[in-house]
Amino acid sequence: MAHPANQRKKPDCGRWESGGREWALPGKRVWPLHLVTPVWNRGTRGTRGLSRAVAPEGSQKKGRSLLQFLADRFYDVQALREYLLRKQVLKVHQKNRPFTYIRERFGPHAAGAYFILKQGGAVKFQGKEWIRSDARGHFSLDFLKFQAVPVEAVDASGCAINYQGLDSVLALKELQSLWLQRCPHVDDWCLGRLHPLANSLQELSLAGCPRISERGLASLHHLQNLRRLDISDLPAVSNPGLTRILVEEMLPSCQVLGADWAQGLPSGPEEQSRDTASPLPA
């Protein structure tokens, strides 16, 4: 510690400065120098003017920096979301591209089977066993030898097939069973394209497709050879019970599954009284 003669006392702040270090006396209140100094330079008495002199400018800087930070982060999030959306759309588009080379060399049945297997689905040739891809998406290419054997069943459940990808499926003119369960990109427009399969298709499953509504189901009137139709768990259908009744009238020879007749219809006394409580306008 330095000699007391070389020490200087600051009477207003209760500090001792010695050897480049500062010491505070016990019982003395110490004011931060970097805040007190600008107040005394402006001629403000005491510390009451501290908040008026310093706070507005500091709060404005903090406000501007916070707004700028939020604007920058918000722009980054928006840009990231748009980038991921474009990437997802491009990925779906690539998955639904046609395999022209396989179709020209091995025929439409082999090309359609290859398309479904690349999507992660399964196919069944007439008189053959089911062909599926493994957990890594790999599958045998032995089916390319079945050029003259038609595909009779396709299981595309959960696949990313869309309107464009249906071209490979519609080329299977002798297809009898088609499962499109939980396909996120199958919508009403896709159902309107199934009429080329009207002579062969007997079983169709649309269970769990989130983008299929009553309008798409109405376009199935071309499929008069259908014997089994699953329309369960369609969130876009507002009244499943009434929709099932209309579909059964449209396809009298088809067994419609997945929706109760009373589902979506007022059945309880409370709902009936609620309907009759409000009189019709005169």
Image (cartoon, rainbow, N blue to C red):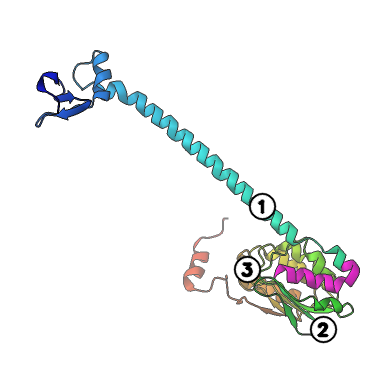
Check disc 3 and report the residue beneath it. 234
Rendered image quadrant of residue 40: top left
Rendered image quadrant of residue 42: top left
Check disc 2 and report the residue beneath it. 126
Q: Is residue 107 in the magenta section? A: yes
Residue at horizontal 24 percent and vertical 22 percent from the top:
36
Residue 121 locus on image (x, y percent): 71, 73
**Amino acid identity at mark 1:** Lys
Residue at horizontal 61 percent and vertical 68 percent from the top:
239
Q: Earlier in the sequence, mark 1 or mark 3?
A: 1
Name the mark nearer the viewer: 1 or 3: 1
Rendered image quadrant of residue 164: bottom right
Q: Secondary structure at mark 3?
A: loop
* Quadrant position of the N terminus in the picture: top left
- Identify which residue, 140 or 10, lies in the foreground: 10
As drawn, the label of residue 87 is 1
Q: Secondary structure at mark 2?
A: loop
Q: CA distance from mark 1 to mark 3?
A: 27 Å
Up-down: is 142 above or below 40? Answer: below
Up-down: is 35 above or below 125? Answer: above
Q: Residues within 10 Å of mark 1 (few under 14, many from 20)?
A: few
Q: Earlier in the sequence, mark 2 or mark 1?
A: 1
**Amino acid identity at mark 2:** Gln
Q: CA distance from mark 3 to mark 2?
A: 31 Å
Q: Which residues are magenta?
A: 103-120
Kindly check if marks 2 and 1 are in contact, taking CB atoms under 8 A apart as contact.
no
**Amino acid identity at mark 3:** Leu
As drawn, the label of residue 63 is none
Q: Is residue 153 in the magenta section? A: no
